[in-house]
Amino acid sequence: MVENMENVKKKTTDFTTGSPAKHILMFYWPLIMTSMLQQIYNFVDMMIVGKGLGDHALASVGNMGSLFFLIVGFSFGLANGFGVLIAQSFGAKDIKELRHRLAGTIQLTVVIAVILTVFSVLFLPYALRLLRTDELLMNNCLKYGYIIFGGITASICYNVSAAVLRALGDSRTPLKAIIISSIVNLSLDSFCIFILHTGVEGAAIATIVSQIVSTIICVRRLSQLEVIRLSRSDFKNERTIYFDLFKNGLPMAFMNSITAIGVMVVQYFINGYGVDYTTAYSACSKYLNLFMNPASTAGNAMSAYTSQNYGAKKYDRIKEGLKVCLTISFAAYVLLGSIMVLIPEKIVRILIDGDAAVGLACEYLPICGVAIIAVDCLFVVRSGVQGMGDPVLPMWSGVLEMILRIAAISCLMGRLGFKAAAFAEICAWVGALIVNVYAFCRILIPKLRSEREQHNINNLFLKIHVKNDA
């Protein structure tokens, strides 16, 4: 087993030894490049749609964002939950448990992919009507949505394979996958829209193909790791393996879906005010996702780092990792929050042309730019809580997010107009942050005290032993 662990360490990262800052930063840079490339190619994808097909097409694709996040966010939460347990097994150096958990993850992923594909395709038209989607956008939404949700298995498989790689400390392979898939996506996007004139369905096809490519790259890399090469016996799992995976994965999945429902309610209110509002909200959502990305990625790093150290029972290192990841988030806030506050019109016009939609977006972005530090800290703290094996309180924080977001938009939309959407986001971020700070302290502080007491006892016995020897 020791030989196996030494072999895998050469290809992954063991966060339980060495400098926390060095390990996190070395893991973070490929991770942030991966995440930023993913956001950038999603952003450029929207820009190609907007400039090539017009603001209505952009609004149609953007209108699908909350629905897409509802389904993909669910699978992403499951993947991260499964990844936490795999990382804990890796940190504890328990290879047998690691392999059984990986085999269970593969089996559950296949079942979940089939269920989510059928569910999302069948209920797409009803969901669009519930969102009060404008009839001008409905046809394009359906064209784009049927293809995206029909091929959602590719996205689910990428999320799971990338989560497993991150759990093992490999952030470089997902970077390689995104670089290649981004090139594929943008090339196909341009070809389908500008050469073949396919419309929004061309953008959807390009997205699915690029996700298939990224999945193949990640799965190929996993197959090369000898320590997690599975046999038939690994797939003969006891019920406890599936129970543990679901116990950790489902609360994270539900948290994402609950958050998505809150966003969908905001979308419902926005859509009721017309296409200009929908277009502005689509553009603002893209920028918000882009500018939250560095902190969100710091959260992913915090999750992998915390999971391994929690599995190894090295709790003091978790506190050091928190400091590093929060520093990253604050630096991102200073830079990107300033852009949202100081030059909103310049960045909005990159995506949309209509003056009315641009004006609305310029009301939203500066407000969120001032308060985005709340969600930046939320990503890090919540990931730390999940990494320590408590997905339940973060899930309840997602419920609180949804309640606060819905309450704010319903109370303020009539008075503040489009600005209400920004205040709804801020209320949700702050509420969820408070819950997760409480959860983080509740879990870690007793562990730190216990660790220090054990350390003091060990020192006492060592002194007694030295004294007796003398």
Image: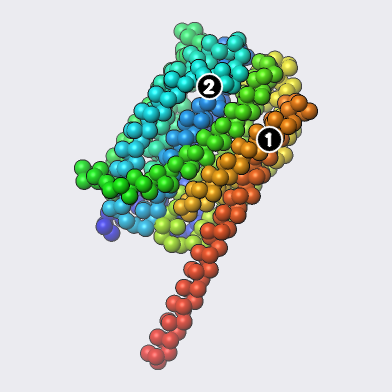
The numbered mark, 2 or 1, whose residue comes first in the sequence reads: 2
Q: Give the answer, above or below, for where 43 lies relative to 99.
A: above
Horizontal and vertical percent for residue 75? 44, 35
10 Å neighbourhood of mark 2: few (<14), some, or many (≥20)? Answer: some
Q: Give the answer, above or below, for where 82 lies relative to 182.
A: below
The C terminus is located in which quarter?
bottom left
Q: Nearer the viewer, residue 157 or 262?
A: 262
Residue 469 horizontal side relative to residue 271, left or right: left
SS at badge 1: helix
Residue 284 figure quarter: top right
Residue 455 horizontal side relative to residue 234, left or right: right
Q: Residue at x 51, y 10 (%)?
A: 199
Residue assigned mark 1: 407
Q: What is the C-alpha distance between the residues marked 2 and 1? A: 21 Å
Horizontal and vertical percent for residue 125? 50, 17
Q: Count numbered badges in the picture.
A: 2
Horizontal and vertical percent for residue 202? 47, 14
The N terminus is located in which quarter?
bottom left
Which amino acid, mark 1?
Ala
Q: Residue at x 61, y 45 (%)?
A: 432
Question: Does any portion of residue 336 appear in the rendered image?
Answer: no
Question: Does any portion of residue 438 appear in the rendered image?
Answer: yes
Q: Which mark is residue 127?
A: 2
Q: Give the answer, above or below, for where 461 lies relative to 9.
A: below
Q: Nearer the viewer, residue 138 or 91?
A: 138
Mark 2 and 1 residues: CB-CB less than 8 Å, in contact? no
